[in-house]
Image: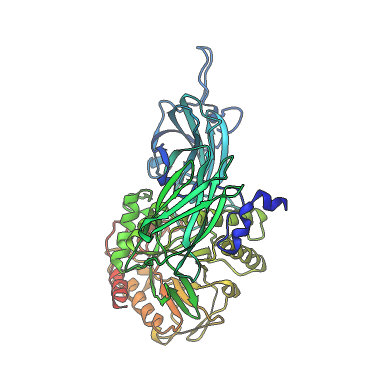
């Protein structure tokens, strides 16, 4: 039983699942005592990636000892970059840069009995963190949070934090070497110091139990020595005031009978939840809902729902930069809402926490996925471990967000024995961590027979919802008239058409409206007209997600006249202009 003693919460897997490694970051950082480290950070550009070596050792931030000494690097008097923010959009010479950038920030601190952590919303792709010239930790993965405890590393007075970021694409990275979006690097999300008591509320889950509208279940986990404490859990509007006691490992689980108004796009209701221990208090707004599948139906709160969606990349095209703020999240989600969406697919990685929380307030359901993308070597055990880590980080961060209804494991991966085995294990891991949401992945493994399209990917047998990327009218010719195309499947499951569409340059009205290589708005609009004729005839279709909301930067798109480094499949242009296809999708969604 030594493993159980080390991880006492494993028994909780049967209900919701729990982490299989140490806690990576605190739940609900914004509800804690934080000191923002956002703002200007001094940087050193390190294209040859030499700053970690003994010769230069940028993390030591060495100064000349006397007038006979010299140091061939310095954070002083050099460039400064905004954090959060990608480095590619802040300096023209870094536009396509893929290597190391070192960041430095100083802060003043007065030591006390409190514990201190440093939290990063995300760094792309690898991060090494040094505090007062001592490495406190590393992280790999560009789209999920991480933290390190600094209690024993900080001193009274001025302290420095140096972060090496590196966005070089690597073969065994996730994503790998080739992907169709811009590789924004740097400290792309918020950075904060978090002060906590010696024993603090580290983690909690407060959600409706699967398929039960009147049972709120979950757990509370304390961190620190002497973690046996009395806990009060309150949801005032539901008249819940539950007294609990943690066990020797600081954990308590609970079941609460209640009758909450369940969250939905029409009524995105949430409740104030207060958790108070003997040493710590945290308050968060949480909603409750049930999501399940029955046959080919997706049921939200027991009622069939059609997911009117759109794909979104985490980019503000007008700025040519990563989206990083609450205002950025609102801009993207407002476009989706105006389109008529009740659902968004966040492609192809977990987006900023601002986006998830804003969508919850706006009544938008969310599909979240990890960037297991084309070209992944599934036989590589290092890649398998990274996949599991990323799924864990994604689920841990957003498990209390009721609008997240789907976890996605991958996008457009080719069926092989190694792929099927690796994704099977990953799906099992996701279900272990969270049994209350739906599991999917986007496949493009289809069979075309005359006027019939058949879904055959065997991995679909393990999914709650099938998801298919198909580009009839663009990459694949229509076999017959769109309205005559039929779809069949080996699986009695609901289908989300997770990608479809084509490219168009805004304002391009070509003379040949039937020619794809003109990149015309008319041709793109016709694709969507034809798609909706076909989609209406799929009896098990329960959601659509056009690719994509807005044009996005992609170095793989090099048709100089029409693309020029942009994927032009957006319903909106890179300036936010509505293309003709926008109105076709809007009419379809409002008609539903």
Query: Seen from this angle, which residue lies furthest right?
Result: 1
Query: Seen from this angle, which residue lies furthest top?
Result: 67
Quarter location, residue 345: bottom left
Q: Position of residue 295 (x, y in %)?
A: 50, 81
Vertical order, 302 against 227 (above or below): below
Nearest the viewer among 126 and 562 is: 126
Q: Position of residue 292 (x, y in %)?
A: 48, 72
Q: Quadrant of the C terminus?
A: bottom left
Q: Position of residue 529 (x, y in %)?
A: 33, 78
Q: Position of residue 337 (x, y in %)?
A: 31, 64
Nearest the viewer among 527 and 278 is: 278
Left or right, 87 with respect to 465, comes to left
What residue lies at 67% left-to-right and 68% top-to-bottom? 417
| Total numbered circles | 0
Vertical order, 418 against 90 (above or below): below
Left or right, 503 with respect to 133, comes to left
The answer, for residue 372, to whether it is visible in the render is: yes
Left or right, 319 with respect to 462, comes to left
What residue lies at 41% left-to-right and 74% top-to-bottom? 543
- Structure colour scheme: rainbow
Vertical order, 144 against 545 (above or below): above
Left or right, 178 with respect to 578, comes to right
The answer, for residue 512, to whether it is visible in the render is: no
């Amino acid at each position: 039983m030594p493993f159980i003693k080390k991880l006492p919460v494993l028994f909780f897997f049967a209900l919701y699942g729990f982490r299989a490694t140490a806690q990576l970051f605190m739940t609900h950082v914004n509800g804690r005592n934080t000191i923002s480290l956002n703002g200007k950070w001094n940087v050193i550009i390190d294209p040859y990636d030499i700053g970690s070596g003994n010769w230069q050792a940028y993390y030591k931030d060495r100064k000349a000892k006397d007038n006979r000494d010299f140091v061939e690097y310095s954070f002083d008097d050099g460039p400064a970059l905004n954090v959060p923010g990608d480095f590619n959009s802040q300096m023209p010479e870094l536009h396509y840069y893929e290597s190391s950038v070192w960041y430095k920030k100083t802060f003043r601190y007065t030591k006390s009995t409190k514990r201190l952590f440093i939290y990063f919303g995300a760094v792309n792709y690898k991060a090494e963190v040094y505090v007062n010239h001592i490495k406190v930790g590393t992280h790999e993965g560009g789209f999920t949070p991480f933290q390190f405890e600094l209690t024993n590393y900080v001193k009274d007075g001025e302290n420095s934090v140096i972060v090496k970021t590196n966005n070089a694409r690597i073969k065994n990275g996730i994503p790998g070497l080739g992907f169709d979006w811009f590789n924004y690097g740097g400290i792309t999300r918020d950075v904060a110091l978090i002060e906590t008591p010696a024993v603090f509320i580290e983690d909690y889950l407060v959600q409706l139990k699967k398929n039960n509208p009147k049972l709120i279940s979950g757990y509370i986990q304390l961190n620190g020595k002497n973690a046996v404490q009395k806990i009060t859990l309150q949801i005032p509007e539901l008249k819940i005031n539950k007294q609990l006691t943690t066990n020797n490992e600081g954990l308590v689980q609970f079941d609460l009978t209640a009758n909450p108004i369940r969250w939905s796009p029409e009524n995105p209701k949430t409740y104030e939840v207060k958790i108070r221990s003997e040493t710590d208090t945290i308050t968060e707004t949480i909603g409750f809902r049930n999501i399940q599948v029955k046959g080919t139906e997706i049921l939200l709160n027991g009622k069939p729902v059609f997911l009117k969606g759109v794909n979104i990349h985490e980019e503000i095209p007008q700025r040519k930069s990563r989206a990083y703020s609450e205002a950025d999240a609102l801009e993207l989600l407002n476009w989706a809402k105006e389109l008529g969406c009740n659902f968004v697919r966040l492609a192809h990685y977990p987006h900023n926490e601002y986006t998830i929380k804003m969508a919850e307030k706006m009544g938008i359901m969310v599909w979240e996925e990890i960037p297991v993308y084309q070209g992944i070597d599934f036989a590589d055990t290092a890649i398998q471990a990274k996949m599991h880590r990323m799924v864990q980080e994604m689920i841990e961060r957003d498990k209390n967000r009721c609008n997240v209804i789907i976890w996605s494991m991958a996008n457009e991966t080719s069926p092989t024995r190694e792929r099927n085995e690796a994704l099977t294990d990953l799906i099992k891991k996701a279900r272990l961590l969270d049994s209350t949401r739906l599991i999917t992945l986007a496949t493009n493994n289809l069979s075309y027979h005359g006027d019939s399209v058949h879904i055959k990917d065997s991995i679909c047998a393990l999914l709650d919802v099938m998801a298919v990327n198909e580009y009839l009218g663009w990459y694949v010719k229509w076999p017959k008239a769109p309205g005559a195309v039929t779809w069949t499947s080996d699986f009695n499951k609901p289908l989300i058409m997770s990608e479809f569409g084509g490219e168009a340059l805004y304002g391009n009205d070509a003379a040949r409206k039937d020619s794809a290589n003109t990149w015309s708005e008319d041709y793109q609009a016709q694709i969507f007209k034809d798609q909706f004729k076909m989609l209406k005839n799929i009896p098990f279709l329960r959601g659509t997600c056009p690719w994509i909301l807005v044009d996005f930067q992609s170095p793989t798109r090099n048709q100089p006249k029409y693309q020029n480094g942009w994927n032009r499949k957006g319903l909106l242009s890179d300036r936010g202009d509505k293309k003709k296809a926008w109105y076709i999708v809007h009419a379809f969604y409002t008609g539903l």
